[in-house]
Image (cartoon, rainbow, N blue to C red):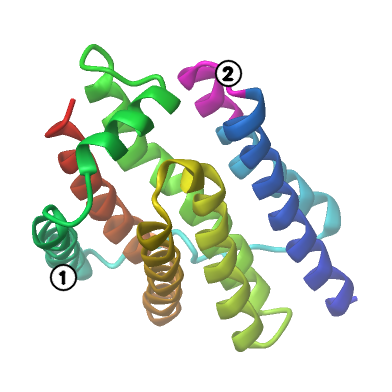
Amino acid sequence: MERKKKYIILTATFVCCVIMALVETVIEPTYWIKSALKIVVFLGLPTAVMKISGIKIKSDSFSLNKKSVFKLAALGAVIYGLIFGVYKLTSGIFDYSALVGSLSSDQQVDGRNFILVAAYISFCNSFLEEFLFRLISFMTLSELSSRRTAYIFSSLMFAVYHIAMIGASFPLPLLILALAGLAVGGLIFDFIDEKSGNIYPSWIVHMFADLALMTIWFLYI
């Protein structure tokens, strides 16, 4: 039974990623329709699969130790600084203006809707991804399989999913750097959530990382 549940989680995560990758790259609906679909696919679908399959999510997965909030905010600020620092160091190597222009076109984002899009990406989208990649495909999976399997699977799916969406926009060197960075980031997210027993650490860090990316994006809007 445990083995069956493990494969249900592996399959459900993979299917969710494939569906959204197709929505992002093939169907390409308007941004807000795409966002609504992501809520259904990344939150609704895995929740339904878990319930139907009898797979229980840890009851304390959403418990928050208030004493850790400032520590998490500090960690998030460090992540923000690191990402923005890498941008400044590599701005003379990569043409970020062309990259951001391509992303803006792909995502149908301009100065009129950027603030709403940035807020959605930083707060809502980050939660949806942490729910699927950390709560389901790491924390829940690790109770049904080895920790190594959960670490590798969740971090790789996190990286590959994002590369599937942005691959066409990135030059190969930056694509490889992004893939490696996303995989390492996924491992770090897994680690800090494992230590705390809930998904708030990775969600907060993810929010700050996205805020850094939104800041860079804003500079070229």
Specify the principal SS of the magenta part. helix
The image quarter in which residue 115 lies: top left
- Residue type at numbered disc 2: Pro
Q: Nearer the viewer, mark 1 or mark 2?
A: 2
Magenta stretch, residue numbers: 28-37
CA–CA distance in space, label 1 to label 2: 39 Å
Q: Nearer the viewer, residue 88 or 149?
A: 88
Is 44 magenta? The answer is no
**10 Å crowding of disc 1: few (<14), some (14-19), many (20+):** few
**Can you identify the residue that label 1 sits on?**
71
Which residue is disc 2 drawn over? 29
Q: Nearer the viewer, residue 202 or 61?
A: 202
Side of 97 where 2 appears, left or right = right
SS for callout 1: helix
Residue 184, position as x, y percentages in the image: 40, 74
Q: Residue at x 40, y 19 (%)?
A: 108
User: Would residue 55 be visible to someone looking at this image?
Assistant: no
Residue at 12% across, 60% down: 77
Of label 1 and label 2, which has the lower sequence position? 2
Residue 127, above or below 172: above
Q: Reply yes or no: does residue 30 show up in magenta.
A: yes
Q: Position of residue 7 (x, y in %)?
A: 82, 69
Instruction: Identify which amino acid the numbered label 1 is placed on.
Output: Lys
- The residue that appears at 58% across and 18% down in the rendered structure is 29
Q: Quadrant of residue 218?
A: top left
